[in-house]
Image (cartoon, helix red, strand yellow):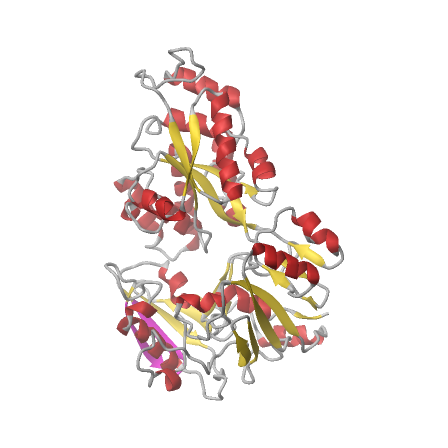
Amino acid sequence: MKKRICLVLALSLLLAFSALGQKQGGTLNGPVITTAFVENFNPFTQDANRNPARGFMYDVLVVYNVRQNTVDYRLATSLEYSDDLLSITYHLREGVKWSDGEDFTADDVVFSYKLGQSYPALDVMGLFQGDTPKLTGVEKVDDYTVRFTLSQVDTTVEWFIPSHHIVAEHIWKDVEDPATFENLNPVGTGPLTQVEKFNQQQITVCRNPEYWEEGKPYIDCVRLRQYQGNDQVQAALIRGEIDWGSNFIPDIEKTYAAKDPENHKFWYPAASPVAIHLNTTKQPFSDLAFRQAFSVALDRDEIVDLATYGYASVNPHITGLGDFYEKWYNDEINEQYDWLNEFDPDKAIEILDEAGYKDVDGDGFRENPDGTPIEFGIMVVNGWTDWVQSVQMVTEYLKEIGIRAKTKTVEWGQYVNNWKNQDFDAGMLWGTAGVSPYRFYEEHLHSRHRGSIAIYQANHGFNSPETDALIESYAKTADLEEQRKIVDQMQILMAENLPIIPIFSNPVWYQYSTKRFVGWPTEEDPFINPNFYDAGERVIMINNISQK
């Protein structure tokens, strides 16, 4: 049996934290951009990210801590695969109670997942629904053990299982329609379950009297305030109305940090990789030499400095992986292929000349080797100012090597449809930042995603049975070293074929104030990804914050 032991949250560590003298009490204030709060604490609804339901009220089985490359066990204490990799068994934490004092047991877990079987609207991760469900069943082994049966060998399923929320069977078993249930009196296992105040502009939720982590949370309450946009959030941060923000703020050094250098802080770690995706079914993108010249023509450092205020992170390697995935870098691979990521317009010109791209008519722009003109648009969403400027800069770099390209701004709906229908020449798009680079490569390279409605699953046209087989092999093993070797091959495949041109990594937008509270994740202490919109990450954050 391949068993994963509990890595964090041992009782001894909790007691050690208390010994450091964290103050108890206080109400933490945070922003939510929305028109108005809706009184609904159902963790399965789409609005649950805008209220305290996910993470604060309802804890999760495990948190995949991507900053530390660890698994933080919470309602579960360990998990193990069967020898044939067709089932996963979770061992649950004993002694956990629901906020109304009832015991938390395996019955609650089995009940909650079976809700996803019975109500497709609740199965947001597609564990049981769709053409290719990930699971075929869930069963109670004993009061604190649950087993999930997989539809096929797929060791990535464990990443999705904790995203399904666990609710109290003794409350929800009598709910007529769980998909529309407003859950106005929530009973949860999370650190903050008691709704003290609600109106359309503000939600205050306070500590769970039965919370399982001794001494936590250190704070008494979280107050979420409603704002209309980033400008209002910025003003509220400066005035000290809120203690953290998760929004883009232009020139933040001057507009926020300089207002109170001692307390106004921000940290923008690398997150999802961003690239120019090329439609390899069209000329000239069907030619690898053209794609290589396209890449070396770009000054990525300048794009980051000018278009993103320096907040994004240059992707240092051509494999598509940014610093979010730095633990997966392979130095030998990068040494071999990094030339494709370096700004070298002379090299770009040399490549194009050798490949037969000449300026036949003398207008300053090259034609294809067959004499046909080269002109294409690079698609980007209208209003995404940093991305629009990035694309504008890309077209200028291409102009310097004799390639005519233009910025094609489109509205969001058209952007989505164009990706789905493969109706584009080139376009700027993000990739997934998750537990492993597998998801990034799988969504970009596997043929199953051609025509997908999920736009980050690009349709650049580069697919093959060999690529599919390589990607699928990752999910057929639970051996981390073997998975790393497979990811290495994916990096080589991306570098050698260049269906996308990596540009930078989007940052995690995260501002915080140390005037009233401490214990925030920082660049010096990156104990968790600073994302207040992810249930698992924000429960780790909130449990580390205390009064100054």
When the figure is inspected, residue 378 is found, relative to residue 108, above or below; the finding is above
Q: Is residue 215 above or below residue 399?
A: below
Choose between 358 and 379: the one closer to the eye: 379
78 sits to left or right of 287: right
Tell which of 77 and 481 is nearer to you. Answer: 77
Residue, x 43% and y 13% (percent of image)? 363
Residue 205 in view: yes
Segment colored magenta: 136-149
- In the image, is residue 228 above or below residue 37? above
> Would you say residue 146 sits in the magenta stretch?
yes
**Residue 68 location, x and y as percent?**
55, 58
- The quadrant in which the N terminus is found is bottom left
Q: Is residue 447 magenta?
A: no
Task: Give how far across and how far down residue 262 sits, in percent.
Answer: 76, 57
**Residue for point 53% across, 24% down:** 344
Q: Quadrant of residue 509?
A: bottom right
Q: Main secondary structure of the magenta part?
A: strand
Q: Is residue 446 something that shows in the picture?
A: no
Q: Position of residue 173 (x, y in %)?
A: 33, 84
